[in-house]
Image (tube, rainbow, N blue to C red):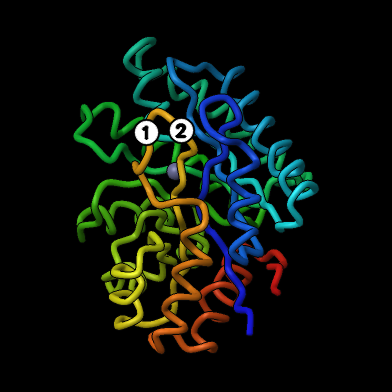
């Protein structure tokens, strides 16, 4: 019996990695649906480059879907690390200006149905200057306002979750009139109870250990590989096959019931993103 497998967060980089071959490998182990998230390029971007990158991610998802049969959805936007890099090079005001312009373009791609969600928004995962954190918050607020109007979800990139961070994010969502149920915490800890209690949807890295732990908390989460597709950084994350592999292994081990697998891979993403999820 085949179970569905949805990878909520993977990057595909034809320049520095294996490109759509990553999606083919995902498919070879039973992967059905992949959310392909725009990957920050090296260097300092500007609005133009950010928009180009979003557009090429959309095209990549279209090509990957055609070539592999995996249902591919693009997630586009501006990463907090890009806001930080721009702030360092041109000051926070200019950085926010570029990020906002690129976010408007990303939201248009969603409105056109070429992308399905905005991401990654939030805060750098490393300690950053207060003015950079504040700039990221302004960009997040703007992204949530546009996502609210577009009716789409937003993938969050943040430092380790704390109650302070949770309150900060929920505060921004409230100001934007954005429902937490459409906020996805990418790279969620397997102990996702606090995140789910805030109404935010957790997405847990697919290792056997993580998913075993997450299943002890419940089945209201998604799985992701966070594959970065960069050959110079092998093993920086799990492989693009991780989600279907771990799903099958834990099912065989009797840890992951069929019903929970359908919840994790189909129900939760369909409810969160409002898109159709492919199944075996
Ligand atoms: Zn990512």
Q: Residue 46: x percent and y percent?
A: 52, 16
Decide: few, some or many residues near mark 1? Use Cα within 10 Å; few <14, some 14-19, many ≥20. Answer: few
Check contact, mark 2 vs mark 1: CB within 8 A: yes
Point 46% across, 83% down: residue? 251
Q: Which residue matches tag 2?
A: 230
Q: Residue 93: x percent and y percent?
A: 40, 18
In the shown orientation, is residue 188 left or right of residue 48? Answer: left
Point 60% across, 52% down: residue? 25
Q: Circle 1 — which element?
A: loop
Q: Which residue matches tag 1?
A: 233
Q: Which mark is residue 264?
A: none
Rendering quarter of residue 249: bottom left
Establish if 266 lies above or below 156: below
Q: Residue furthest top?
A: 90
Q: Residue 2: x percent and y percent?
A: 63, 79
Rendering quarter of residue 202: bottom left
Quadrant including the N terminus: bottom right
């Amino acid at each position: 019996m085949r179970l569905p497998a949805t990878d909520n967060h993977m990057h595909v980089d034809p320049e520095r990695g294996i490109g759509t071959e990553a999606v083919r490998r995902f498919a070879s182990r039973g992967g059905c649906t992949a959310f392909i998230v725009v990957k920050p390029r090296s260097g300092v971007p500007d609005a133009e480059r950010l928009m180009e990158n979003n557009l090429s991610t959309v095209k990549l998802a279209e090509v990957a879907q055609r070539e592999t049969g995996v249902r591919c959805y693009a997630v586009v936007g501006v990463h907090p690390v890009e806001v930080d890099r721009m702030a360092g090079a041109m000051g926070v005001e200019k950085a926010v200006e570029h990020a906002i312009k690129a976010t408007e373009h990303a939201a248009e791609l969603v409105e056109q149905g070429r992308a399905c969600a905005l991401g990654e928004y939030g805060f750098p995962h490393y300690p950053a200057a207060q003015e950079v954190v504040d700039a990221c918050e302004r960009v997040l607020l703007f992204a949530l306002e546009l996502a609210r109007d577009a009716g789409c979800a937003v993938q969050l990139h943040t430092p380790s979750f704390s109650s302070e961070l949770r309150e900060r994010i929920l505060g921004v969502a409230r100001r934007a009139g954005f429902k937490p149920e459409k906020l996805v915490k990418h790279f969620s800890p397997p102990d996702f109870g606090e995140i789910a209690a805030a109404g935010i949807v957790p997405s847990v890295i697919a290792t056997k250990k993580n998913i075993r732990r997450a299943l002890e908390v419940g089945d209201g989460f998604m799985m992701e590989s966070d594959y970065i597709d960069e050959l110079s950084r092998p093993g920086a994350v799990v492989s693009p096959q991780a989600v279907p592999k771990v799903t099958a292994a834990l099912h065989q081990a009797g840890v992951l019931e069929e019903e929970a697998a359908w919840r994790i891979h189909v129900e939760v993403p369909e409810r969160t993103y409002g898109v159709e999820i492919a199944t075996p």
